[in-house]
Image (tube, rainbow, N blue to C red):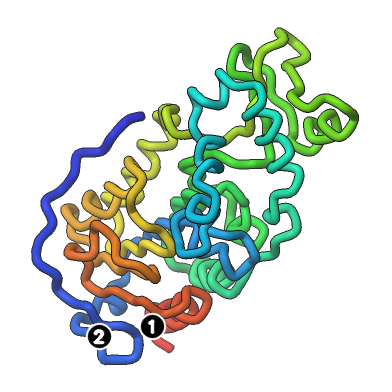
Amino acid sequence: MPVLTPVECPPPRSNAGLGGAPVTRWHQRTGRIAVLTGAGISTDSGIPDFRGPRGVWTEDPVAELLSTYDNYVSDSALRERSWQARRNNPAWGAEPNPAHLALVELERAGRALTIVTQNVDRLHQRAGSGSRRVIEIHGNMFDVVCVDCAYSATMAETLDRVGSGEPDPPCPHCGGILKAAVIMFGQALDHRTLLEASLAAETADIFLAVGTSLQVEPAASLCGRAVKAGAALIIVNAEPTPYDSMATEIVREPIGEALPRLVDLMLGR
């Protein structure tokens, strides 16, 4: 997997939450805004995160194997479990929450905004964010691809095959292994997508990291690239992250409450 060059962390500049006066006037900057979103932004929509106290991998460490490419392609029993997990994924019935909607409001107010999401649930687009504004750095769960050929299909039609008695449906073109169109551990990110995400970080005046532990590279390194280019880094996350020392401001409040208020700040309300 490509890795962005880490940037040395300076001492913390602020640890204020929204309850106190901001130490800097970062919210008055008028340039481009980039937002990196992780699983934490979707928990209020009923989709559990991965590493939190009640995260999917915290409660069931074996589930992390489902996200590792080598394990997936080498173990048919693991693939069968994975297909069943996809059928029961809470994301199918999830709706955007106030945090997703706040970013839509920021976009509609005319701010130059790019969302780089680690999530595969497409709740940003369902909330109303323009598809050209959203970079899905880890892919999406709504499409299926073959690991051996160029075949692709929708997840819905492939899950119909699972429901009809194919526990591990093979590629109908070459007989190869099918998987969701998501980037698994051990897979390289799409080069063009990574370049787009890097450009968004390097040209941002404000960089928000929302609901992400900032432990998965190369997405986490976008914070360092943004700060190195002069952006104010705002981290909104319940737990500490490796990039907290770079942050202009750190917010530990619930994301569904904090992000709408941050948007109000940026819009001067």
- Per the rendering, the mark at residue 46 is none
**Left or right, residue 266 beside residue 175:** left
The quarter of the displayed image where residue 155 is located: top right
Give the x, y percent position of residue 190.
44, 30
Q: Dot 2 lies on which element?
A: loop
4 and 63: which is toward the camera: 63
> Pointer 2: what residue?
22
Q: How many numbered discs? A: 2
**Residue in view at x 33 percent, y 54 percent:** 214
Which quadrant of the figure contains the C terminus?
bottom left
Residue 8, above or below 104 = above
Observer-side mark, 2 or 1, equals: 2
Disc on the earlier residue, 2 or 1: 2
Amino acid type at circle 1 is Leu
Amino acid type at circle 2 is Pro
The quarter of the displayed image where residue 168 is located: top right
Give the x, y percent position of residue 204.
30, 57
Please report contact status of discs 2 and 1: CB closer than 8 Å, yes or no.
yes
- Going by the picture, which residue comes out furthest to the right? 164
The CA distance from mark 2 to mark 1 is 10 Å
Give the x, y percent position of residue 223.
27, 54
> Pointer 1: what residue?
265
Residue 10, above or below 186 = below
Give the x, y percent position of residue 12.
14, 70
**Residue in view at x 67 percent, y 30 percent:** 144
- Going by the picture, which residue comes out furthest to the bottom? 20
Q: Dot 1 lies on which element?
A: helix
**Residue in view at x 58 percent, y 50 percent:** 131
Density class for disc 2 (Cα within 10 Å; few <14, some 14-19, many ≥20) is some
**Residue in view at x 32 percent, y 44 percent:** 199
60 and 8: which is toward the camera: 60
